[in-house]
Image (tube, helix red, strand yellow):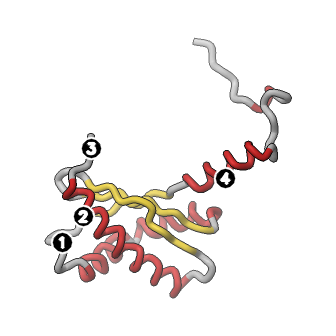
Amino acid sequence: MEETNRQKKIGGVIQKDLVDVLQSAAQEGMRGVIISVTKVSVTTDLSQAKVFLSIFPSDKRDELVPAIQSNSKAIRHELAKRTKNQLRRVPNLTFYGDDSLDYIENINASLRGEDINPIKNPDILPKRKKS
């Protein structure tokens, strides 16, 4: 289902302010980690928001996304302070790791010929199950 203009606007407001909250937290606690908010998707009743995070270096994603999710109440409170003049109510935040940059890097490596060629070595392909 297509997002309404209101959902897109609220998602944009949350995304813009959430970047500031997460970047300031990353600067205080973790040196050398870049956190960016790639997309915010808000439900039609505006009560839930899915937040997709891109984290560099990507090997820290698996430990940071659960840590950020466990601190979602504090993040939501800070977000409410920043958006008090724009939003009446801040939706509940659910954080997900965005692996689209890794996917793009894998495609680029395949195009450059840096990975194993499945035509020459078909053993690397997943086996199909017979039904």
Is 96 placed left or right of 113 in the picture?
A: left
Give the CA separation, mark 1 to mark 3: 22 Å
Who's the residue at 57% across and 60% down the image? Answer: 62
| Lower sequence index among marks 2 and 3 | 3
Quadrant assignment, res 131: top right
Point out which mark residue 10 bears: 2
- Which residue is disc 1 drawn over? 87
Who's the residue at 48% across and 69% down the image? Answer: 36
- Which residue is disc 3 drawn over? 2
Give the CA separation, mark 1 to mark 4: 37 Å
Image quadrant where one finds the N terminus: top left
Q: Position of residue 96 (x, y in %)?
A: 45, 57
| Lower sequence index among marks 1 and 2 | 2
Point out which mark residue 105 bears: 4
Instruction: Residue type at mark 3: give it.
Output: Glu
Is 41 placed left or right of 114 in the picture?
A: left
| Lower sequence index among marks 4 and 3 | 3
Who's the residue at 65% across and 20% down the image? Answer: 128
